Image: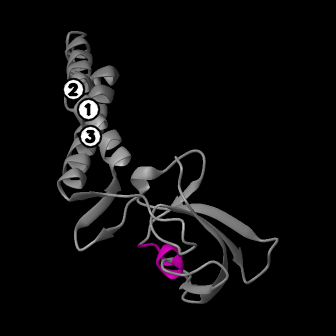
Amino acid sequence: MTQTSENVTWLTQEAYDQLKAELEYLSGPARVEIAKKIEAAREEGDLRENGGYHAAKEEQGKQELRVRQLTQLLQQAKVGEAPADTGVVAPGMVVTIAFDGDPDDTLTFLLASREYASADVETYSPQSPLGSGVNGKKVGQDAEYELPNGRTASVRILEAKPYQG
């Protein structure tokens, strides 16, 4: 799905189209909606103590930040294919690992940019310690990554399948 490397973000066509549609909505109809909210709140009177006005302005700021993030992401995007089902961990794969080789202590996650965060599966960035540790490993191999406390953890790759979204 995505991998950021040297300021390039790789996206599938579907992901690119989704992000582009979000950008078009946020920079078009959503801007009009928030401007109406701000204007309506402004008409209520004193802006210093107008909670609706301040909430609308805060929402506008968050929306504009997202517009800038999406614009930058899409400018750096390269559209490509979803990863092949080869059993090698790569961005765009749903990966199942076992901690310290214990098959009962497992975690399944999507290795992708947080732009792909989904309610269906937890998402880890390829640049995260765990993500970079498992990236490029094959099913059955062990991988190590550094924990925040400086120690090293070991995991075994149990499964790596392309994300079907």
Tell me where residue 46 appears, x and y as whole percent. 21, 17
Q: Amino acid at mark 1?
A: Leu
Q: Amino acid at mark 3?
A: Lys
Spatial separation of the CA atoms under disc 3 and disc 2 = 16 Å
**Classed neighbour count for the residue bearing mark 1: other residues with Cα under 10 Å, few (<14), some (14–19), many (≥20):** some
Judged from the image, the secondary structure of the residue bearing numbered disc 2 is helix
On screen, residue 23 above or below 25: below
Residue 93 numbered mark, or none:
none
Residue, far right: 104
Q: Which residue is mark 1?
A: 26
Spatial separation of the CA atoms under disc 1 and disc 2 = 6 Å
Kindly indicate the quadrant of the structure image that contains residue 99. Answer: bottom right
Relative horizontal placement of residue 48, taking residue 120 as reference (left or right): left
Residues at badges 1 and 2 in contact (C-beta under 8 Å)? Answer: yes
Q: Viewer-nearest of labels 3 and 1?
A: 3
Q: Residue at x 26, y 25 (%)?
A: 30
Tell me where residue 122 appears, x and y as whole percent. 58, 56
Q: Name which of mark 1 and mark 2 comes first in the sequence.
A: 1
- Residue placed most toward the observer, 129 or 141: 141
Q: Which residue is mark 3?
A: 20
Q: Which residue is mark 2?
A: 31
Q: Residue at x 54, y 50 (%)?
A: 164
Q: Is residue 130 magenta?
A: yes
Judged from the image, the secondary structure of the residue bearing numbered disc 3 is helix
On screen, residue 146 above or below 75: below
**Classed neighbour count for the residue bearing mark 2: other residues with Cα under 10 Å, few (<14), some (14–19), many (≥20):** some
